[in-house]
Amino acid sequence: MIDFPNAKINIGLNIKEKRTDGFHNIETIFYPLTLSDILEIQINSDNDRPTLTNTGLAVDTPDENNIVFKAFEIMRKFNIIPEVNMHLHKIIPFGAGLGGGSSDAAFTLKILNELFSLEKQKKQLQDYAESLGSDCPFFLKNTPQYAFEKGNKTEPVNLSLKGFSILLVVPNIQISTKFAYQGVKVEKPKVSLKKRIEEIPVNEWKYHIQNDFETHLFEHYNELADIKNQLYEAGAVFASLSGSGSAIFGIFEETPPDVNFPDSYFVWKEKLRY
């Protein structure tokens, strides 16, 4: 069985407070893209252990530490299922704030649930997904969502970007979540991000919607600030860092123009669906 774990962007990201468990409470809007990896899972009748192979971008981690493998282990812990062969063709850049790994894990759960007719309800799959990562549960819903607490809790948001286009740019920079949080300022917003997104027109977002990681990361990586400025110069109505990674996206009312970015950059365009 083959499926296509997709990326997401964060529209706005507010870091509201430090939690007692060491994490942070945040609020953000998760918005799904069509940019995706390719994941295939087949029943393995020849070996006595599951296998995981990889093409595309190199995944520099042992199989047992790969989040796809961990997702399989969680499903096997609570269900009697045979061994499988898993193959991941990796396209979504790492460390970019696009949720590629989390999406791979969530889609592993969905494929296994369907492949073996486990009939797990959404709540069960979401619990499994949450144990793998804070934004994994979002990919089981995969529609625009307001995310809160650690990003693990979501609810629908009244947002339509259908007809707009996106230009996504990822330089050759990988940013760890730990580093991203080291320089942030924690401040509870006066107005919720969900309210702002639902009430403010897209072409005014740049005056009201921000990603709290930008100040710290733009100071450390001037390249990211330059990309954001280039997107605005190219006609974007809104441009932002995605999550705590290195991806910068611009939202355009028309098809984005070709911008002369270095060949080492990952560049992606698509028409938005939701």
Image (cartoon, rainbow, N blue to C red):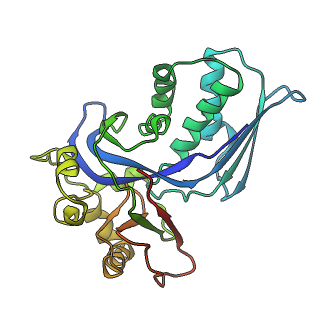
Q: Is residue 164 left or right of residue 40?
A: left
Locate residue 245, reporting x and y percent. 41, 58
- Number of numbered discs: 0
Locate residue 173, reporting x and y percent. 48, 67
Which one is in front, 15 or 114? 114
Q: Is residue 164 left or right of residue 121?
A: left
Q: Residue furthest left?
A: 190
Where is residue 156, by image quadrant?
top left
Q: Residue furthest bottom?
A: 260
Picture residue at 43% right of the left edge, 74% below the top: 256
Q: Is residue 202 left or right of residue 58?
A: left
Which quadrant of the rendered structure holds the N terminus? top right
Picture residue at 22% right of the left edge, 61% below the top: 205
Picture residue at 57% right of the left edge, 57% below the top: 92
Q: Residue furthest front?
A: 163
Query: Does residue 13 sit above or below 232 in this rendering?
Result: above
Where is residue 235, by image quadrant?
bottom left
Q: Is residue 21 left or right of residue 195?
A: right
Query: Does residue 83 sit above or below 55 in this rendering?
Result: above
Locate residue 167, reporting x and y percent. 44, 69
Which one is in front, 214 or 165? 165
